[in-house]
Amino acid sequence: MINRKGPFGCFAIETLSENESVSEYAMAVIGSNDSGCFLPCLINRYGDIRELSFDYSGMIPISEFGSTGQNDNKFPNIPSHGRKLGQRRKAVGNLLIQLITIMNKLLPPEGLVLSPENLYTDKDGIILKSCYRPLEFRMSSMRLSAVDINDMERLINTGFISDVLTEDEKQSLLHAVATGDEDLYLNCCRTIRTTSAMRPHKDHLSIRRDLIIPSLTVICAVYSYVSIGRKAAVLFAGAGLILTFRVIMLDRKDKGTKTISKQDQGQLRRKILFSPETTGKACDNAKDLSYDIHYASIRSVNNEDPDKTKSFSIFTDKVTIGSDRFLSDIVIEEESVESQHAAITYDNDRYYLTDLSRSNTTYIEDKALSAGKSYEIKNNQKLTFGDQDYRFLISFYGDQMTQSERDL
């Protein structure tokens, strides 16, 4: 990626090759940006050249923080010094935890740009924004270990981030990435973002609370042997042994469960993302891979003012379309659209449109639908609800995706 500055702002630019496809699913997820850690992504086209463009206007790369004259990563000795470092530490924790968050949303971690030259902060160093390349990474392992350990090491040793992490936290993060230990990684990230002071990272409590009762039982057994008698001592000793044995068995069970969980975290994500027959298999042709999750969208056709184009995402097996917010999943507030006008369903890898309106004003390519009957709809077809025209777009299909991208 390169940083490009111009009269209308600052942008991080990456040119796409011909065989790279933009995932509309990734665009929708990152576009929602619940965490606020991601820069908005735009797609520029200059003839046959396509670019991903990330707007970082008003910010600077963290690699330049403290070296531009307007910033100083060694804050002056003023009361706000600790507060700013605490805010920066929280921002770093929020950024690092995105590696797990995006995978849980079925986005490959390879798309997150970890280069210090392409992570951006404000002049005070308390806001941190990153780029996510919304491309189709077909063969991602969907595991933390898929992240390049060298990229991670270079990132956390950058002065901007290194200043707010302890050596123990750095080593914990690197070890977690190298081994794919998501539990350790999450625990460390949560500690970073919830504690303003830097303190050593601990993986577990020093006191085992579940051993308190067995320990007290053993103490009672010893006391009984001395003061009461052997029968009471044997009773307490037996109870202590049973409780201790129970704790040992539970530990073994939990350890086995955690081991399986760590090994299967990426596999479970891939099982959701990819179909069983392709999971874990090498495939040279991306079209040989099919997805278990599906994504489509409808986009309004507004020739008069393209800036007023509306887009609605479809993730579930059935969505209803209408003007009533309580009855419909996709709301089109227009007089010609009834409260529950139509439904789009997904079945056996195909999408179907059903007219639910009383006026029978649902159309596919200007052809009216019979009430209550389901019609298959294809990628890039025009759908009409009342007098409102929409373009139906399906993601996760190579050639069709390329065609839909042309309509953006």
Image: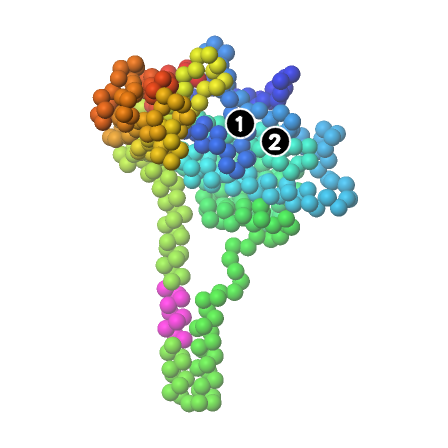
Name the residue nearer the viewer: 70 or 284. 70
Q: Quadrant of residue 93?
A: top right
Q: Position of residue 147 (x, y in %)?
A: 48, 36
Judge from the rendering whether residue 142 lies leftward or rightward of residue 186; answer left or right. left
The front one of 306 and 203 is 306
* Element at label 2: strand
How many marks the image carries: the answer is 2
| Sequence-first disc among 1 and 2 | 1
Looking at the rendered structure, the secondary structure element under dot 1 is loop
Q: Is residue 73 visible?
A: yes
The amino acid beneath tag 2 is Tyr
Instruction: State the quadrant of the C terminus.
Output: top left
The reply to whether residue 288 is visible in this rendering is no
Q: Principal SS element in the magenta part?
A: helix
Q: Is residue 140 above or below residue 240?
A: above
Place of residue 228 in the rendered image (x, y in percent of width and height, measured from the top left): 44, 90
- According to the picture, the residue beneath numbered tag 2 turns out to be 120
* Residue found at x 55% / y 35%: 37
Span colored in magenta: 240-249
In the image, is residue 245 part of the stretch drawn in magenta?
yes
Q: Residue furthest right?
A: 77
Residue 222 in magenta stretch: no
The residue nearer to you, when weighing 32 against 157, is 32
Q: Which residue is mark 1?
A: 40
- Disc 2 crowd rating (10 Å Cα; few below 14, some 14-19, many 20+) is many
Residue at image point 77% right, 44% down: 78
Residue 143 pos. (x, y %): 42, 39
Q: Position of residue 83 (x, y in %)?
A: 69, 45
Q: Residue furthest top?
A: 47
Mark 1 is on which residue type? Pro
Q: Nearer the viewer, residue 271 or 7?
A: 7
Residue positioned 55% across, 41% down in the render: 94
